Amino acid sequence: MNTKELINDAVSLPVEERVLVVDSLLRSLNKPESDIDKKWAVVAKQRLADLRSGSVQSIPGKEVFDRVWNRFE
């Protein structure tokens, strides 16, 4: 099977299976680093706790992207 055939077969898969293929390919290019992942997990848990406690407020995604786009107009 050549690359073109492989891609055509992959594209014909259901979305959920394509996601698994893409994830597997990306992981093969960017090996997870457990130390970094652990540090990010700590940060993510702290941010979630901050949101739940009300010490910070979330900003809707649309508002964030609008602010970014407005910077570059």
Image: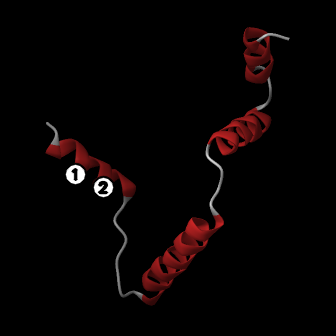
Residue in view at x 79 percent, y 17 percent: 6
Q: Amino acid at mark 1?
A: Arg
Q: Secondary structure at mark 1?
A: helix
For disc 2, the marked residue is: 64
Q: Estimate the x, y position of residue 67 in percent, counting from the top left.
A: 22, 51
Q: Secondary structure at mark 2?
A: helix
Q: Quadrant of the C terminus?
A: top left
Instruction: Classify mark 1: residues with Cα within 10 Å, few (<14), some (14-19) or many (20+).
Output: few
The front one of 9 and 59 is 9
Left or right of 7, for residue 63: left
Residue in view at x 16 percent, y 39 percent: 72
Q: Estimate the x, y position of residue 52 in percent, counting from the top left.
A: 48, 84
Left or right of 43, for residue 72: left
Q: Residue furthest right?
A: 1
Q: In the rendered view, would you say 44 is above or below 10? A: below
Asked which quadrant contains residue 5, the reply is: top right
Residue in view at x 49 percent, y 82 percent: 46
Asked which quadrant contains residue 54, the reply is: bottom left
Left or right of 50, for residue 15: right
For disc 1, the marked residue is: 67
